[in-house]
Image (cartoon, coloured by chain):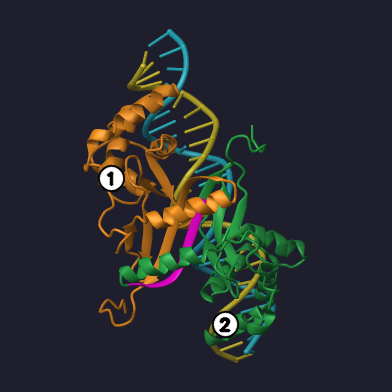
Chain colours: A orange, B green, C cyan, D yellow
DNA sequence: CTTGCTGCAAAAGTTTTGCACACGT
DNA sequence: ACGTGTGCAAAACTTTTGCAGCAAG
């Protein structure tokens, strides 16, 4: 277990000192583009920040509305796009039928180990993988700007977790 | 460039000796499940085999129809599902709006380096990456059954390929 | 005030499904 | 013959868009 960490790789609460509050980041981003920081965008951002793992647009909408806010699906989608552009969240390719997103601002890049049986997802961070990624990029004359590592595994027989 | 190969990692024509013809594989798979090997399925499989890289359902349909075959979109989707179950093709997560597939039977697992600017995709195979993948899986008590590595890179400034 | 934003509902795009008929085994 | 498969068209689903009124800077 030298290089992969099985706990949550980083919670933003860990050291808020080095980072501007994400809200400020977003406001600055919007201002720079002549866009407005509306109540809806604030509420959506807040909800995003409360999520500790991967989420979907529809789920986000549901949570926002459950909190009693009047926000439409269209606004959620529109805001997600801005959050991605602002570098606050990232699209995570998990499944081609629906978009998944993840908070990234101020977090180490995380990858996912998916338990094929149960769909359970384990986050991990492997600097080795990143090193290889960078080398492969360089070998092709490119500059790495991101990656997505998805590993699928099954529970070996007799682990006591058999699904059927 | 010790571990990544920049050419097409493997063409099925390379050594057909060790593998059953894919068509036979598919027939066997279908028979085992009490399913039928229809003309439509044969034509779709043939078209899949002719593709040397990632493809989409709609594109596949278009090609099949261009060859003068009367196949419906529904059948293409249904057949793709079987091909995946048979282990002949694999879904490749590239983009969350549309499913992408790739022939995998008899091929080394390949990963993709995506040039963010142009969308160009470079296939590569890295045994190191696979080794790390296997180790990470084992560390979590899982047995690796697959993976997906997607690296995004940009052309460094002054490479003469500037998009704008 | 000006400009962008929101909600709504309709549109767009991909994938799935129900049904009546046709075809492999 | 039986049980599946097929095409068609409609449905289901996620995401986008046009528009009229609304709100942030």
Question: Mark 1: few, some, or many residues within 10 Å (few <14, many ≥20)?
Answer: some
What is the count of numbered marks?
Answer: 2
Q: Is residue A115 visible?
A: no
User: Residue A112: which quarter of the image?
Assistant: bottom left
* Image coordinates for residue B140, horizontal then vertical, percent: 31, 68
Chain letter of mark 1 equals A
Which residue lies under the disc numbered 2? B30
- Cβ–Cβ under 8 Å for marks 1 and 2: no
Other residues around mark 2 within 10 Å, as few (<14) / some (14–19) / many (≥20) = some
Figure check: B29 above or below B84:
below
Main secondary-structure element of the magenta-colored stretch = strand
Residue ranking furthest to the right: B68
Q: Position of residue B43 (x, y in %)?
A: 70, 72
Residue found at the very far front of the displayed protein? B2
Please give the range of residues in magenta: B142-151
Front residue of B71 and B134: B134
Q: Looking at the rendering, in which quadrant would you find the N terminus of chain B?
A: bottom right
Task: Tell me: residue A123, above or below residue B37.
Answer: above
Residue at position x 44%, y 21% in the image:
A34
* On-image quarter of the C terminus of chain B: top right
- Residue nearest the viewer, comparing A54 with B77: A54
């Amino acid at each position: 277990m030298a290089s992969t960490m099985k706990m949550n790789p980083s919670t933003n609460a860990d050291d808020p000192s080095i980072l501007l509050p994400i809200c400020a980041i977003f406001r600055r981003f919007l201002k720079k583009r002549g866009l407005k920081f509306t109540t809806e965008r604030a509420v959506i951002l807040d909800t995003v920040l409360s999520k500790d793992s991967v989420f979907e647009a529809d789920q986000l909408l549901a949570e926002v509305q459950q909190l009693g806010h009047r926000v439409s699906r269209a606004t959620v989608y529109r805001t997600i796009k801005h959050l991605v552009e602002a570098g606050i969240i990232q699209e995570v390719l998990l499944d081609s039928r629906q978009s998944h997103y993840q908070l990234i601002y101020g977090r180490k890049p995380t990858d996912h180990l998916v338990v094929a049986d149960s769909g359970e997802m384990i986050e991990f961070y492997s600097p080795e993988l990143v090193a290889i990624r960078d080398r492969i990029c360089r070998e092709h004359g490119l500059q790495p700007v991101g990656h997505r590592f998805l590993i699928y595994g099954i529970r070996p027989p007799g682990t006591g977790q058999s699904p059927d």
